[in-house]
Amino acid sequence: MAAKEPTINENINESTELAKERNREAADRTLMAWIRTSLSLIGFGFGIDAMVQTLERTALGDAPNLAMNARVVGLSFIGVALFAVFVSMVQYRQELKMLEAGDYRYKPGLPLGLAVASALGLIGLFAGVGIIIRALAG
């Protein structure tokens, strides 16, 4: 008696499984993109702080408010980056759980790009207003 070959489960649709795999890979790429974006924002935050420290040692010794404002902007960049990477990890895990479920349904989540863009816009607005106020006062 010959061994019976394993049969493919007829309930599994190959195109559905391939679509799920594409969605998982898209989720992986999206997470990696947010990690790269967050690393860039953290780098900008550290760069701003390093510039302030250099300028404090040279020309800004008498302008502590400018140094403090620049540090706040730098820390804001780092805070936005940490928020983005944390939320992207949560969204990634949720997407994987939905894909693992047998009845996958798309559920729109937080538009993370819009949230990060809004936060960076606010940081830019506050920094710009601070620069204008200093220019008008000086």
Image (spheres, helix red, strand yellow):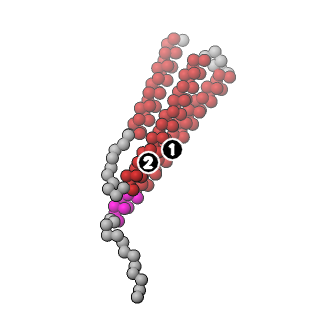
Mark 2 or mark 1, whichever is nearer to me: 2
The disc at residue 35 is: 1
The disc at residue 124 is: none
Q: Residue at x 40, y 88 (%)?
A: 1
Q: Are marks 2 and 1 in contact (CB under 8 Å)?
A: no
Badge 2: how crowded within 10 Å, few (<14), some, or many (20+)?
Answer: some
Q: CA distance from mark 2 to mark 1?
A: 12 Å
Corner quadrant of residue 15: bottom left
The disc at residue 92 is: 2
Badge 1: how crowded within 10 Å, few (<14), some, or many (20+)?
Answer: some
The amino acid pointed to by label 2 is Tyr
Which element is circle 1 on? helix
37 or 99: nearer the eye?
99
User: Which of the two discs, 2 and 1, labels the residue nearer the N terminus?
Assistant: 1
Q: Residue furthest front?
A: 1
Residue 20 painted magenta = yes
Q: State the quadrant of the C terminus.
A: top right
Residue 84 % position (x, y):
47, 39
Residue 77 % position (x, y):
52, 32
Q: Residue at x 44, y 48 (%)?
A: 92
Residue 128 painted magenta = no
Residue 45 % position (x, y):
56, 32
Give, as a single range, the part of the protein colored magenta.
14-21
